[in-house]
Image (spheres, rainbow, N blue to C red):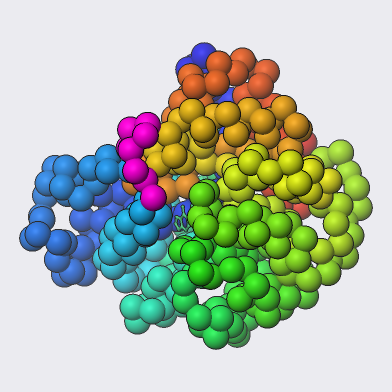
Amino acid sequence: MDEFIHALPKCEHHVHLEGTLSPSHRLLCSQRNNIPLPNNINSLAALESELYPSQYDYEEGQDGSNYLREFLANYYAAMEVLVTVEDFRGLAAEYIERARKMNVRYAEIFFDPQAHTSRGVAFKTVMEGILKARDDEKRQHEGSSDYVRTEYILCFLRDMTAESALETWDAAVNGGYLKAIIGIGLDSDENGHPPQKFDKVFVAAREAGLKITAHCDVDQPDCHANISYVATQLGGSRIREAPSDLILAPKFDSGADRIDHGLNCADSPELLNLIKQSNLGLTLCPMGYSKHLGPKSVFEKLEKIKEIGIPFCLNSDDPAYMCRYKEKVVVDVQEKTGWNMEDLAACEITAMRMSWCKELEFKQKF
Ligand code: ADE
Ligand code: ZN
């Protein structure tokens, strides 16, 4: 089974670039930029053991209610070492190299520009770095069987202001970067920051022809209301896409194009029905939630979503912190569910159908 999973062509649509910041790249950037790490750590071994313990590996039944906040605090602190174009290039290049080794052939990757511009790093620096990694990959591997195709999804931080999101949007427009991104998303702390707060920027993105998604994180207080709003309202009206066997076309004329997480729809027959009717796909990260919710509840929900026929794909979320990149996520989900090879292959085919990649030819070859 492990060999089958390794060889299976895979893709992912829910991985945060900054969540792939490895201890070694963090150390390298810290030394290169003269930015000390906490506790004066200056060796990889110390960094790995002190700052990347498996604190997100909650045992079943353990209280994980502060999980997202605790995680985000560490996530933002860690990325303070990322300053130069080369730091961002290296970050993206390292993910692409890992993806290649796992047979991940296509990835739509989130990035969080405000987490950098708020520290004084120019938007252009972030973009130049991550686009250079993608261009290098294209130049060196396109056309060969080990090519990793990537697209970027610009995420807005929901715990920052709506004005800050609009400033970031303007920076993308004025810098000529809209063509370099495939869509926009919403991440960070959901509590008290509903998707409605960002209506203006989502409508602008829709008008610019970009795809739209938003986190509806698991077990956040408003997760049900947020799933419903994202499915039906976010981004305003859209031009209905032509139905196709290969492209998952949302059936509604409004709402986002995908939902990130959204696992809690399994608690509500109305939400399950809404998502099924809308033909929206969920980018699930079951191993991530399994750590704070307990595996039993997560896998019961996952089975329900599968049984009802809602499209979903399996993703790593923040793999450097959650100790699992995509291949290990699939291995672990298989162990928990007992899914067979056909089930797993079907997941990757659905993932490709859920992708926003426009070229049918690429999708067919996948
Ligand atoms: N940013 C990075 N990872 C995230 C997650 N799991 N939820 C919300 N925002 C995030
Ligand atoms: Zn996420």
- Relative to 152, does residue 45 appear above or below in the rendering? above
Residue ID at (42%, 48%): 318
Residue ID at (56%, 81%): 162
* Displayed quadrant of residue 347: top right
Figure quadrant of residue 31: bottom left
Q: Is residue 208 visible?
A: no
* Residue range corresponding to the magenta coloring: 57-65
Q: Position of residue 212 (x, y in %)?
A: 68, 62
- Does residue 292 appear in the picture of this structure? yes
Using the image, determine if residue 23 lies above or below residue 300.
below
Please tell me whether residue 220 is drawn above or below residue 270 in the rendered image: below
Q: Position of residue 46 (x, y in %)?
A: 12, 46
Q: Magenta segment: does it hold 60?
A: yes
- Residue for point 48% across, 19% down: 335
The spot of residue 331 in percent (x, y) is: 48, 24
User: Does residue 176 appear left or right of residue 23 in this picture?
Assistant: right
Instruction: Decide: is 167 above or below 254.
Output: below
Q: Main secondary structure of the magenta part?
A: loop
Residue in view at x 66 percent, y 69 percent: 179
Quarter of the figure that contains the C terminus: top right
Asked whether 271 or 244 is in front, the reply is 271
Whether residue 62 appears in magenta in the rendering, the answer is: yes
162 or 355, which is in the foreground?
A: 162
